[in-house]
Image (cartoon, coloured by chain):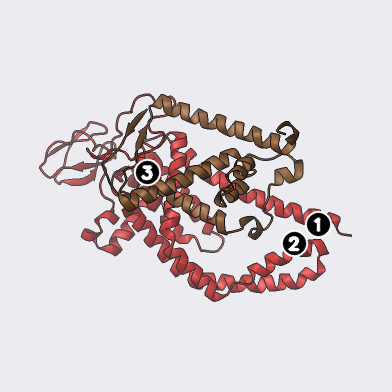
Amino acid sequence: MHLHLPPRNRTFGFVDALGVTGAVGLAIARWVPVARIVPFWGCVLREQTGWPCLGCGLTRAADRFAHGDFIGALQANPLGAVAAAFFALCVVASALHLAFGVPLPEVRLSPREARGARWALVVAVVLNYAFVVVQTRFPHLLA
Amino acid sequence: MQVRCPHCASVFPSDRAGTQFCPRCGAQIHVPEEGQVVEAGLPPFAPGAPPEPSGAEGPGPGEGPTPALPPGVREPTPWERRRELGLFKAVVETWKASVLSPRRFWPSVRPEAPWTEALLYGWLIGAVTSIASIPLRVWQQRRSVDELREAAERLEELPARLRDILRPIVESAGAGTTGDVVAQAILGALLWPVGFIILAAVLHLCCLLVGASRGGFGATARAVGYAWGPMVILYLPFIGWLGWVYAAVLAAWGVKELHETTWERAVGAVVIPFVVVCCFACCLGMAGVGAAFSSLRASP
């Protein structure tokens, strides 16, 4: 892994774009009650079969994170809470970068490391889904 | 002067400099002013302009070391030469090239040029389309209000539970006024850059996931901006959705050429967000249909 710290700059880059995305997403989660506004909001799979889908709990995780309930967000969907925290971090980093020119570190991964990172993401998604399934179907196992 | 094509290595006579096509292989090449022999295509990234930061750069599985640079001459798009061509001609030429000749357009786009140029082009297309579509949207809104009014009258004939589900939808959908439509169009035009940045960020995340991010965020943003041409038909009845589809095809083409990756990876990067959105929309639709059916079953 190669970590590089560029000189002070205010160039709008990928982290800033993620910051904008995070700011908009977290603002919606904080002030717009999406689940109440959009008709038929909910998971069809869970309603019909009782089993959650891969995305179950993401709305609750974003909503709880945006309201400062971090533990609640983790309980709703751990990976969703981590993603929300990542976007919040991007918002702060982007604000510092664009306002004060704080340089953002550039991470370069070798092809092997990049492959490893992708596999780690796949494993994280599977583990997260396993947690959501256990929490929804077998909550006594977590008690 | 004699010119050597960087693609097929054939040598042919030419009496002028500038961009032209090889008579043997048909590839677009650039002949320098001085009359030297063209030996190779221009590198895709300018020296001293490193790729922008990203989390998982580099070739993906099975790609091995950095592949040889593809042949092709990269040059400023007509939009980026608008001072020389004039604004109107620059927009029209860029639109024609990106929408009608993508095979020739995308390999010529420079991935390292400022992505704000593509944002400005896309914004112009998006804003003009949004404002120009106001009369059509007002007409459509009036028609749908009439239809919803009729539907609201028929609601009384439906079973009570189904009526309770549909009433808020019908009432909220029919509540929009002409002013709302105009405000929506103007707001949409003003906020277009925010949507563009979010779209580019999501697409670049997907590019990182599939290992197609060689050109950095700027290249992805340029692919999104210059792929916006087909969106001029977005508000046309019945065929508006084709604008999204063709824009997605062009974005995939742009990702392939600007990140110098394979078709599989480029299409994968563009399709992932579409699949997520489609799954989400299908879930909402199925939930609606399911709710309607279960209420019908439960009603006496």
Q: Chain of mark 3?
A: B
The one of A117 and A140 positioned closer to us in this rendering: A140
Which of the 4 image quadrants contains residue A135?
Answer: top right
Q: Amino acid under label 3?
A: Phe
Q: Nearer the viewer, residue A136 or B50?
A: A136
In the image, farthest residue toward the left: B34
Identify residue for label 2: B165
SS of the residue under disc 1: helix
Dot 3 or dot 2, earlier in sequence: 2
Which structural element holds mark 3? helix
Residue ID for mark 3 = B217
Q: Which chain is brown?
A: A
Q: Nearer the viewer, residue B2 or B58?
A: B58
Identify residue for label 1.
Answer: B295
A96 sits left or right of A52 in the view: left
Please rate how many residues cluster around mark 2, counting C-alpha atoms within 10 Å: few if below 14, some from 14 to 19, many from 20. some
Residue appearing at x 31%, y 57% in the figure = B93
Query: What distance separates the C-alpha of mark 1 from that of mark 2?
Result: 9 Å
Specify whether disc 3 shares its chain with disc 2.
yes
Please say if the residues under marks 1 and 2 sit with CB atoms less than 8 Å apart.
yes
Front one among B255 and B197: B197
N-term mark: 1 or 2 = 2
Residue type marked 1? Ser
Q: Chain B shown in which color?
A: red
* Residue positioned 57% across, 70% down in the render: B140
Which x, y percent locates residue A10?
30, 49
Q: Earlier in the sequence, mark 1 or mark 3?
A: 3
